[in-house]
Every structure is written in C-alpha cells, then in structure tokens.
Amino acid sequence: MTATQPLAGTPALDRIRVGSAPDSWGVWFPDDPRQVPWQRFLDEVAQAGYSWIELGPYGYLPTDPARLTEEITRRALKVSAGTVFTALHRGPAVWDATWDHVAQVARLTQAMGARHLVVIPAFWRDDKTAEVLESPDLTPEQWRDLAGGMERLGRRVREEFGLEIVVHPHADTHIDGEENVARFLDATDPDAVGLCLDTGHYAYCGGDSVKLIETYGERIGYLHLKQVDPEILAEVVRDGVPFGPAVQRGVMCEPPGGVPELEPVLTAAQGLGIDLFAIVEQDMYPCPPDRPFPIAERTRRFLRSCGA
C-alpha cells in the first residue's frame, strides 16, 4: 500500500469530491499583505494533489472570467463554489446591497462552471478586532427575516444564475451550533436553502456532524472538512475567546489530529447517496507563507487513506 491508497477494507467514497480552498493557505480577505499571493496558492494547491478549489473571498483570485479560466485551466483545476457573506437578519433594508454583492460573486461562480454558492451569515463580533458588533442572539422577528431572506436569496440565485445556495454555520454568527442550525433548517424551505456542513465550525460550536447528517441529510448539499484541537477549544470556551484570536491560538488543526473524526463523517455523507463536494479548510490566518503547502499535502494523503 502506498501513502495515497486507501487502507485495506476502507470503503471507496466514490460520491465525495475532495478539494481545497484559499482558507487553507491563510486567506481570509481579498487583499492582505500577510496572505500568500494568489498565484502561489493556485500553484501549491495543484501541486498538493487537489483538482477542485473554491474562489475564496471575492477579489483574491482574478475576477475576470477569461483570466481566471486561463489560470485554473493550465493548472488542471476546477471551481466548486463561490462564497458570500450576508446579514439578512437585518431585514428588507439590506436586501439591495446584499443582492448586488451576491450577484457579483454568483456571476463569476457561474462563469467558472460551478454550481454552488456558499452563504456565510454575518459575524456578530469582528473576526479581526473581536469587537462585539451586535447581540449574539436574534429576536423572533430577526429569525423570520433571516429565514425569509435566505429563501428569497436561494430562489433568486437559482433563477438568475442556476446555482444552489448552501448556508454555512459558522462560529461567532447566529447560525452556529446544534440548536440554532436546527432552528434555521426547520424555518426554511428545503427546496430553496441547502446546508454547507463545516465539520470544524460545527464541532467548535458543540455540534455532532454525523448526527446532523443522519438527522438532516436531505438538507446537506456541501461539506467543508475541518478539525478543531479539543484542548485549545476547551481553553477558548473557558476564556470566551472570539473566533479570530482562537484561530491564532491554533484551534483549527491539521487532520487527523483533532475532532471530529473525519472517516465517520465521510462515511455518513457517502451514505446519503448523492455527489458531494468536500472542501478542505484549515483556518490559519495569519500564517507564515511556507506553512500551508506541506499541511495540504499531508491532508490530501490522509483523505486518500480514508477512501476519498
């Protein structure tokens, strides 16, 4: 057996398409001097053995479709999804500005041949400064605005761009752990709104990814593969550390050294009987420029050993 072959007896995860993202190279923002240049990201993600990538923050990769197509094609890469941040819990007043941004990202995502748009709710505290921006708890009216806004967004994105939205539960947002994720899913139309299960964020917020897949499997449309260091997470929870500083402490760690175990998650996802992207992310902003590539190579070898 080579390092890239599945372990004996490991079932082939033939419905899982593995990729990576700028996030695994420490990229959180369109432009930041502490981030690796986009050319280096593309070179290294291809060299690490991945075929699929996400666009990352809009403006990090070239936004001209012809230029981006040229850059990814010559590296034998393809795009699985774009990503947007929204604050739809703030009601109809934010719709026009939200749609302008979503349409911009969706247009590029569509041009790259992708079929998914990952939608991340707005942070209630700043990921750089840790400043509390609003209450971590939504009122009933805000929950209605959030659910209704996401349904409207999902329908319009599909109608105008042929994309499916998958909402991403995320630390320090209003859609985070088990209770709020269930509340959001129960309040939204399955035909309009899917879920991007990020295994690391869900574990960070106390959730069980396998249980979520087993309970709400029909809503799972996309995966982010990520792990948290349980010892650092315990310190983060104890000290009330915001997500950004928690990342700097190393709370998101390299597989297979953290939780949740990814093999049971992948097996549960395979059991859904649908094709799913599983995009590797390891939040590392900011990080030394030479750190991401060897981690990406080792993670790809580990996922191959799991059958993915």
Image: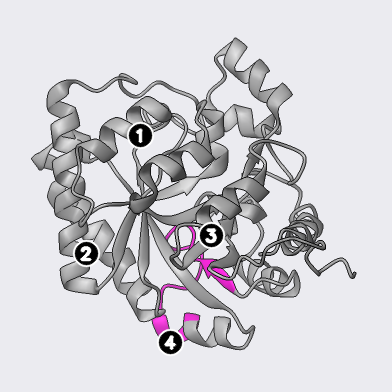
Residues under numbered marks 2 and 1 in contact, where contact means CB atoms less than 8 Å apart:
no
The alpha-carbon separation of the residues under discs 4 and 2 comes to 22 Å
On screen, residue 40 above or below 303: below
Residues packed near mark 3 inside 10 Å, few (<14), some (14 to 19) or many (20 plus): some
Residue 224 is situated, as x and y percent measured from the top left of the image, at 53, 52
Magenta stretch?
52-68
Residue highlighted by disc 2? 157
Distance from Cα at disc 1 to Cα at disc 4: 38 Å
N-terminal label among 4 and 3 = 4
Q: Position of residue 298 (x, y in %)?
A: 80, 58
| Residue 194 lies in the magenta stretch | no
User: From mark 2 to mark 3, how far is it between C-alphas?
Assistant: 27 Å
Q: Between label 2 and label 3, give the one nearer the viewer.
A: 3
Determine if the magenta segment contains residue 61. Answer: yes
| Mark 2 burial class by Cα count in 10 Å: few <14, some 14-19, many 20+ | many
Camera-nearest residue between 286 and 263: 263
Q: Which residue is mark 1?
A: 181
Q: Amino acid at mark 4?
A: Ala
Quadrant of the snapshot with the N terminus: bottom right
The correct choice, above or below, for 125 with respect to 258 in the image is: above
